[in-house]
Image: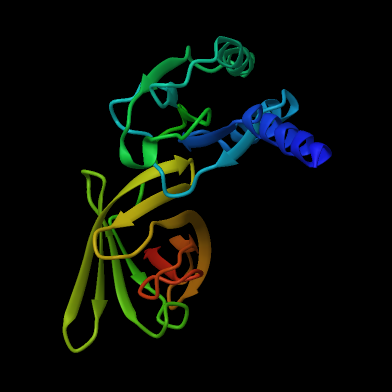
Amino acid sequence: MKAIIIIAVLFLLVSCSSPTVFLTTERLPQKERQELISALSENGFKVKATSGVMVPEEFPDVVVATNPANENPEFFAKLEQVIRQQNLEPVAYQKFYQQKHYYKGRNVGLYVRGNAPELRLPPVLRGNHQTCNNQRMILEFKNNKRVHIDVEKEEITSYKGSYQSILPDTIHANFDSLESPVTLRLSKVSVETYAGMKTADKIVVTKSSNKVLPENCEFMIIHY
């Protein structure tokens, strides 16, 4: 019985000594993002990259978010050292309770905004019905970080939301009427047309759990 208690106490101590760093990035190149994750892991931090979480606009470029009761100077000093070694901006701290940005216990959120150029997204793309659950769809990006999807059936159903770039070629989109966020990736491709080979912008849904906007759904606009 005594051995069981000792094992349980040791388990609790290990659990308490291993807080998780929830990493959220925006416009940070994939190479730099992976280097940051590797550096954190090599220095003993447990890292979990978030999905569907955005860097709040009011945040500085590098923010560590904690709950108000979290006080651990050695942990934060070590975390700051790793961040400095990656040549990132100085760390700012946020302590608050707010929905997804509340971190229980000693877990923390690390928000990093990179300096990669904003994505230049085409204003309108048409969906490929064969990859989009046989739906006729139009994807439209607005100047104010808003995004719309129109599904054309007997009537047109519109889904409106907002988007934010997380990598130089990748964005997260949140739609008001869909259950979960969506990840999309932009690329340039060459396609054969009646006027010969042309360049096109192609956007593919790389992560989604929504039936309206399934994974691998493709949108394209050809530049004539």
Looking at the rendered image, the quarter that the N terminus falls into is top right
Q: Residue furthest right?
A: 3
- One can see residue 52 in this view: yes
Above or below — where is 207 with respect to 77? below
Horizontally, residue 72 falls left or right of residue 4, namely: left
* Number of numbered callouts drawn: 0
Q: Residue furthest front?
A: 1
Above or below — where is 56 with respect to 88? below
Residue 204 versus residue 113: which sits nearer the camera? 113
Residue at 39% over, 75% down: 211
Q: Residue furthest left?
A: 155
- What kind of colouring is applied to the model shown? rainbow
- On the image, which quarter does residue 16 sit in? top right
Position in image of residue 164 (x %, y %):
36, 44
Residue at 47% over, 78% down: 131
- One can see residue 122 in this view: no
Position in image of residue 21 (x %, y %):
56, 32
Looking at the rendered image, the quarter that the C terminus falls into is bottom left
Horizontally, residue 8 falls left or right of residue 122, namely: right
Position in image of residue 221 (x %, y %):
37, 65
Above or below — where is 173 with respect to 32? below
Above or below — where is 34 with respect to 93? below
Position in image of residue 184 (x %, y %):
45, 57
Residue at 78% over, 33% down: 6
